[in-house]
Amino acid sequence: MIKNIIFDFGDIFINLDKQIIFREAEKFGGIPYLTPEMQKINDDFEVGAISPDEFISALHDVYPKATPREIENIWNGMLLDFPDHRLDFMANLAEENKYRLFLLSNTNAIHIAHVAIKMGQEKFNRFRNSFEKFYLSQEMGIRKPNAEIFEFVLNENGLKAEETFFVDDTKENTDAAQKLGIRCWNLQVGKEDIVDLKSKL
């Protein structure tokens, strides 16, 4: 029986435009694809290994013609809307008090601050308060799909893997959780919606 649900954030609740970073790279004199260097900069930022200023400075090579403010705007441009029906769904699920609810997101200091502004503090607080705990990779110093991040959430909260359900749009992440015995839903963005969660449990 499922007693605990762990949710990803991007493209599960808030819609994302991940391709903007490549479209804008071309516009600002860079190359429109993910390089190993870009991936490392992003991964380091998501675990808090570099500061926002260091991150933006490192991305100057990717966007050589962009100012620091333009680079920050490009990165935040990835964040689109957070549909109200998903917020209502999450708040109602929390009110039912049937499951222990957790958020586990690979995110960074620039994005999470912008999300609160974009949603408005009242909506953001309503969302955040729907969860027992709000785990962000930048604060944890570790990111998905590293098995340690799932083990940490399980151990810190006394959760049994077989009683835990995890939702993420990235197959690499759900595969990693599945290996620990966690039941998973690899949500297909654009084809499925988190509001259909109960049919997956």
Image (tube, rainbow, N blue to C red):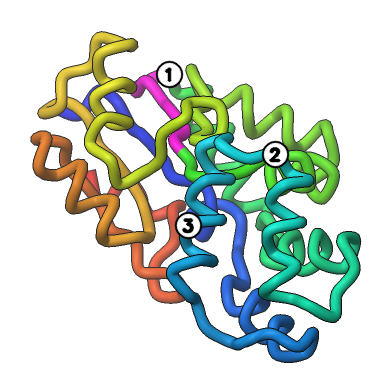
Q: Residue 14: x and y, percent? A: 61, 55
Q: Which residue corresponds to mark 2?
A: 51
Quadrant in the rendering for residue 181: top left
C-alpha span from label 1 to label 2:
37 Å
Q: Indicate the amino acid at tag 2.
A: Ser
Tag 3 or tag 1, which sits nearer the N-term? 3
Residue contact at pointers 1 and 2, CB within 8 angstroms? no
Residue toward you, 34 or 134 = 34
Mark 2: few, some, or many residues within 10 Å (few <14, many ≥20)? some
The quadrant of the rendering that contains the N terminus is top left
Q: Position of residue 81 (x, y in %)?
A: 71, 61
First to last magenta residue range: 97-104
Is 182 situated left or right of 54 in this image? left
Q: Amino acid at mark 3?
A: Lys
- Mark 1: amino acid: Asn
Residue 38 in sight from this viewpoint: yes
Q: Nearer the viewer, mark 1 or mark 3?
A: 3
Q: Earlier in the sequence, mark 3 or mark 2?
A: 3
- Provide the secondary structure element on which disc 2 rests: loop
Q: Which mark is residue 10?
A: none
Residue 187: say if magenta: no
Work out whether 27 lies above or below 3: below
Q: Disc 1 on helix, strand or loop?
A: loop
In this view of the protein, which residue sits in the foreground, 50 or 111? 50
Q: Kindly check if marks 1 and 3 are in contact, taking CB atoms under 8 A apart as contact.
A: no
Locate residue 149, reporting x and y percent: 32, 31
Q: Does the magenta stretch mainly form a helix, a strand or a loop?
A: strand
Say whether residue 167 is left or right of residue 53. left
Q: Is residue 33 above or below residue 150?
A: below
Mark 3 sits on what residue?
40
Q: In this picture, is 74 found above or below 200?
A: below
Give the numbered dot on residue 97: 1
